[in-house]
């Protein structure tokens, strides 16, 4: 039986995007309206440009689902591109610094960056969000929740209590166009994006994702390939424009002594029935992962997004045909896609958690997964 995985296909201005999800057990609810909520959220956020006024992302489930429930076969998801004009789109000869343009042209031996940018485009993240949102039925069945939000834009950082309830976190996040749960910071973030637009520039930031309700023991220290921290970093680090991923304290561990980094362990039998199985910590600097495995604490991950590489004011580049110095190409662009990236990171993390969960509690049907999970919890509590 296949482990849970997905692949995507589609060009930015082609006919559309596809996500092919394999390894989902039979019997899992598929909520198309939730996938569409996530697709719409990804299109939004303050700082988006003209393209998002054209697109109306909604999912079409082409296979693998019958009467709203998975049947164990590969699930294909389709999102249509409204701005479908790839054959008529102009050639791009002045690569944008920061975009895949130059590296791709040198790789595929072409002077037309169009061939690269069509696949490199962050449009592809719509397919990743669809795949991640599809796993909600599975996560819901086991009480696993993932939330993503904007933690920083340029120099404006959000303050968020680490023990805030997820419902409240989502409510605060969804109350503004920065997708930031700190209302004061959100206002300043929106102003920072406005100022960036006046400067004809672009701006990046930091997005955060947290996971709660999952059991310990997801991932494995036995093989490097199975370490969940490494897998999350790869999955999030492969999202367009992400240049850094940290878990828990992340780079902050480097400047502190061990006594201020490691999360001391206590046991509280009253919490035996929670995902921690009773093993609680005074802090969560490890971000819920030790030895590449979940340790029963929430997973806390942050990712840094660079500013969009298509600048209205352009940047110095070289015309690939003449080799003369010219400004990089500009058609239109977002000023900031950090809020959108928070939706992408949330769903990419969600998929990786679902994958790790199904590796440990594998089964052809949701019922078998449930039984494996119940057996694990029972054994772990009896330790
Ligand atoms: C992108 C360039 C822009 C963005 C696009 C990512 O598209 P266009 O070139 O058509 O204006 O809008 O993002 C999306 C289309 C999307 O759905 O997020 C790029 O070059 O990466």
Image (cartoon, grey):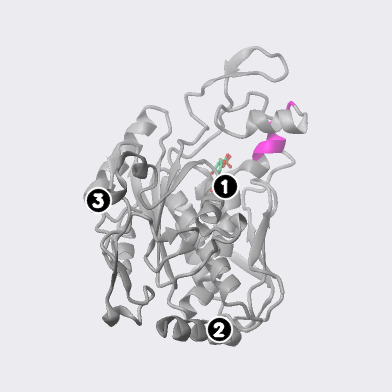
Between circles 3 and 2, the one closer to the viewer is 2
Is the residue 342 above or below the residue 276 in the image?
Answer: above
Name the spot of residue 40 as percent of width and height, x first: 48, 59
Residue in view at x 34 percent, y 49 percent: 151
Q: Earlier in the sequence, mark 3 or mark 2?
A: 3
Label 1, label 2: how far apart the Cα atoms are = 32 Å
Residue annotated with mark 2 = 372
Mark 3 neighbour density, 10 Å: few (under 14) some (14–19) many (20 or more): some
**Residue 344 as seen in the image, left or right of residue 196:** right
Q: Which residue is mark 1?
A: 238
Mark 3 sits near ligand 1, with its Cβ under 8 Å away: no
Lower sequence index among marks 1 and 2: 1
Q: Secondary structure at mark 3?
A: loop
Q: Is residue 193 magenta?
A: no
Region in magenta: 111-117
Instruction: Say if disc 1 is inside 8 Å of ligand 1.
Output: no
Query: With 11 as the anchor, is 165 left or right in this view?
Result: left
Q: Quadrant of ligand 1?
A: top right
């Amino acid at each position: 039986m296949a482990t849970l995985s997905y692949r995507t296909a589609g060009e930015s201005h082609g006919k559309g995007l596809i996500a092919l999800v394999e390894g989902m057990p039979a019997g899992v609810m598929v909520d198309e309206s939730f996938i569409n909520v996530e697709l719409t959220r990804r299109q939004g956020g303050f700082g988006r440009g003209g393209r998002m006024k054209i697109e109306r992302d909604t999912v079409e489930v082409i296979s693998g689902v019958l009467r709203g429930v998975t049947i164990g076969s590969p699930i294909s998801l389709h999102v249509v591109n409204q701005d479908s004009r790839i054959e008529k789109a102009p050639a791009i000869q002045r690569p944008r610094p920061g975009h895949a343009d130059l590296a791709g042209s040198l790789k595929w031996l072409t002077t037309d960056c169009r061939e690269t940018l069509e696949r490199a485009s962050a449009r592809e993240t719509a397919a990743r969000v669809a795949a991640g949102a599809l796993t909600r039925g599975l996560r819901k069945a086991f009480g696993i929740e993932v939330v993503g939000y904007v933690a920083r834009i340029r120099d404006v950082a959000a303050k968020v209590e680490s023990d805030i309830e997820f419902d409240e976190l989502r409510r605060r996040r969804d109350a503004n166009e920065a997708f930031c749960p700190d209302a004061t910071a959100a206002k300043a973030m929106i102003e920072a994006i406005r100022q960036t637009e006046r400067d004809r520039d672009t701006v990046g930031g930091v997005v955060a994702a947290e996971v709660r309700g999952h059991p310990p023991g997801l991932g494995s220290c036995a093989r490097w390939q199975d370490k969940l921290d490494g897998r999350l970093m790869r999955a999030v680090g492969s999202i367009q424009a992400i240049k850094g991923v940290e878990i828990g304290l992340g780079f902050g561990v480097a400047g502190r002594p061990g006594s201020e980094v490691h999360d001391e362990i206590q046991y509280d039998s009253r919490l035996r029935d929670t995902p921690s199985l009773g093993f609680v910590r005074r802090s969560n600097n490890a971000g819920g992962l030790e030895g590449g495995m979940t340790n029963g604490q929430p997973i806390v991950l942050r990712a840094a997004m660079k500013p969009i590489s298509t600048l209205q004011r352009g940047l110095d580049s070289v015309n690939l045909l003449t080799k003369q110095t010219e400004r990089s190409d500009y058609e239109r662009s977002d000023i900031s896609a950090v809020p959108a990236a928070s939706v992408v990171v949330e769903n990419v993390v969600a998929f990786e958690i679902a994958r790790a969960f199904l590796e440990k509690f594998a089964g052809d049907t949701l019922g078998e997964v449930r039984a494996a999970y119940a057996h694990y919890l029972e054994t772990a509590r009896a330790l």
